[in-house]
Amino acid sequence: MFRTAKRVGIASWKVLASLAVLIYLNAPTYAAGKPKPPPVPTIDPAIVYMTYGGSSGIGNLAIANADGTNQKIILSNSVWNRAPSWSPEGTKIVFFSDVAGPGIYVLSINRSTGEADGTPQKIAPIISSYLGMAKPVWSPVPLPVSSGSNRYFVAYSDTTSPNGSDYSIHLVDPSAPGSQFKLSSSLVSTTFGDVGMTWSPDATRLAVSRGRDDSQVPPYDIQIVTLQATDCPLGALVCEVQPRQSLVRDIAGSPLMTADDLLNPTWGNSGAEIAVGAFIRPNANSDIWAIPVLYPEGASNLTKTNKVSPPDRHETLPTWSPDDSQIAYRALGNLCNSKDRNFQGIVVRNVSGKLIDGCIEKILIKDGNFPSWWRNHVP
């Protein structure tokens, strides 16, 4: 009996030993002292931007999740692609490029894979000698037109003659390449005119930054353009109601006059505020401001508005989160969570001023530029 018990004990020990070996061989690597691999971020494209250096190169188009993860280049060319903007349903991107001649292009995106679907399609040529001014933006909802139908439009800036200086608003139906038409006549005499622009949430208005009108001192302001679909000139499906409303004036400009140094207004999704990157004298840097849309006409400055970004830096190209609680923008200079005083890239901050990870702003995308947050993105 003793021998039988002994044999049973030996057999049990062998079974336990075998189980231990199986458990060891099948255990995850972190159980052997190695860290558990992080989960792969879910593809959830929310922000489209232009790469601006580093390993990603300059002038490529890329997308990322709202928290800056899953950064992925979707278009890489030997030419610069800039100023991307989402379509309302988040499956297409409109941008300026010279990939097949200067113009406004549309690229389809597969949201489940985060990959480009096909190749860029040109929907309108650009004749401007200063190509960075175009900055196309897709209407968030369709507009009623004179024919009685509802159509989406892409608004962009362009001149009306080669090497001209009369920048004006142009519209094109993205589903009908070659359908572009001029919305307005420029009211400036020299250099620039209607440049950066943004749609109101209901697409009945455009906020347009205007630069270098010699009749204005200082020569910058933001105007509200109201659209109508009746009594429009021949060939114009939509036209503007005159006179325009001046939202804010006397915004000092930059002597650099580059595409991202102008005002670049962005209308919040609630319709209550418009964010701009503006140079205010005597500072040499640009700050981000949130301007109430109901600001009195003919306002003299931005002192009664909400300054969003920190002082003594250079911030431009704001874009609102879908719920208007945050603004992402391009920043140059030292950040509290970066030791790189020469940092350049896209950061985000809470409009309320509440800290993010102990800082007033969080780095989203290093070496990113021209960010555009999809209006309808819901995390």
Image: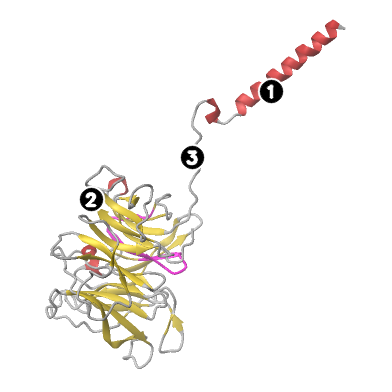
Foreground tag (3 vs 2) = 2
- Of the pair 82 and 176, the residue shown nearer to us: 82
Marks 3 and 2, Cα distance to the nearest angstrom?
31 Å
Which of the two labelled residues, at mark 3 and mark 2, occupies the earlier sequence position?
Answer: 3
Near-viewer residue (371 or 328): 328
Please state the horizontal and vertical placement of residue 347, each as a whole percent of the image. 33, 54
Which numbered tag is attached to residue 19?
1
Please name the amino acid that badge 2 sits on: Gly
Q: Where residue 107 appears, x then y in whole percent? A: 40, 64
> Which span is picked out in magenta?
73-94
Label at residue 333: 2
Mark toward the start of the polypeptide (2 vs 1): 1
In the displayed structure image, the side of residue 269 where residue 58 appears, left or right: left
- Which comes sooner in the sequence, label 3 or label 1? 1
- Secondary structure of the residue carrying tag 2 is loop
On whether residue 90 falls in the magenta region, the answer is: yes
The amino acid type found where label 3 is placed reads Pro
The vertical placement of 72 against 192, above or below, is above
Q: Which residue is drawn at 46% across and 62% down?
A: 377
Q: Are marks 3 and 2 in contact (CB under 8 Å)?
A: no
Q: What element carries label 3?
A: loop
Please state if 38 lies on the left or on the right of 3 as rendered: left
Q: Can residue 179 be seen in this view?
A: no
Give the percent coordinates (x, y) of residue 368: 31, 54
Colour approach in the figure: secondary structure
Residue tagged 3 = 38
